Image: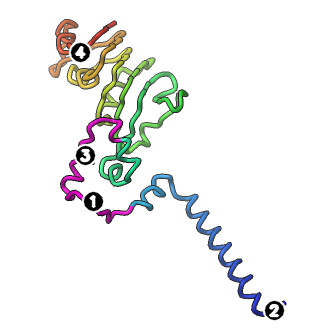
Amino acid sequence: MDSSDHPQTTNSTESMSSDTADNSSMMALSKRDIFLSTYNRRQKFTFPDSIMHYIAKNPKNATVYQKMIKRCKYFFIKNPILVFSWLRYGQNGWETTVKDDWKSIDMNKLSSKLWITDGLMVYPEDVSNVASSIIPKIYRCDVKRLDLENQVISLNELIFLCSSVKELDLLRITVKNDDDTVVLFEEFVKQLPQLNRIK
């Protein structure tokens, strides 16, 4: 064997072992860590930073937001939101639709805010504050259909969830004022003129 061939063999071996080390270190990183590691913080935009910050923090609607984050990671880094068309809580905990199939979500592991666009359904068997517990995680609730069952919820929380609702299904729901008094059904319905159907 020629001595000039030997360094090439050594280099390929060194390269292979460094590739293996890189792969094992990449496997140890979470998808979020990999995403953040590729984000270039020194991006140059045509608009001033203040305008870019405003655009990132105030997306017009969920479709626009999703287009923005597909084009540039800056928008997700500045305002991390996960857009769900449907979100439900039932026997299996929280779930959302992914390609027409329901997938479980561990809400405790989510650090991003939620933007729900089509429907929210809460059907717990024995937990009366599930709907209230999800509200702090919601960035915006544009649902057209809201189904609540076995819940105790404040009037303000319900109005927040119902801001765009057209169809509302309530079963064994108690709506309360801030002073813990029960809200009359008529009083609640008057505050939702956009409803097409209530059950």
User: Which element type, helix, strand or loop, lies under badge 2?
Assistant: loop
User: Which element type, helix, strand or loop, lies under badge 4?
Assistant: loop
Relative to residue 44, is residue 15 drawn left or right? right
| Residue 178: % across, % down | 16, 22
In the rendered structure, are the residues bearing label 1 and label 4 in contact, judged by CB atoms less than 8 Å apart? Answer: no
> Looking at the picture, which amino acid does disc 3 mark?
Lys
> Looking at the picture, which amino acid does disc 1 mark?
Phe
> Looking at the picture, which amino acid does disc 2 mark?
Asp
Q: Read off the residue under disc 2.
A: 2
Q: Read off the residue under disc 4.
A: 194
| Nearer to us: label 3 or label 2 | 2
Q: Residue furthest toward the bottom?
A: 3
State the separation of the CA atoms marked 4 and 2: 84 Å
Q: Residue at x 72, y 84 (%)?
A: 8
State the separation of the CA atoms marked 3 and 2: 64 Å
> Looking at the picture, which amino acid does disc 4 mark?
Gln
Q: Residue furthest toward the left?
A: 179
Q: Quadrant of residue 175?
A: top left
Crowd around label 3: few <14 · some 14–19 · many ≥20 (10 Å): some
| Residue 68: % across, % down | 35, 46
Q: Which mark is residue 45?
A: 1
Looking at marks 3 and 2 on the same chain, the residue that comes earlier in the sequence is marked by 2
Crowd around label 4: few <14 · some 14–19 · many ≥20 (10 Å): some
Q: Residue at x 28, y 24 (%)?
A: 161
199 up-or-down from 26: above or below = above
The part of the chain drawn in magenta is 40-65
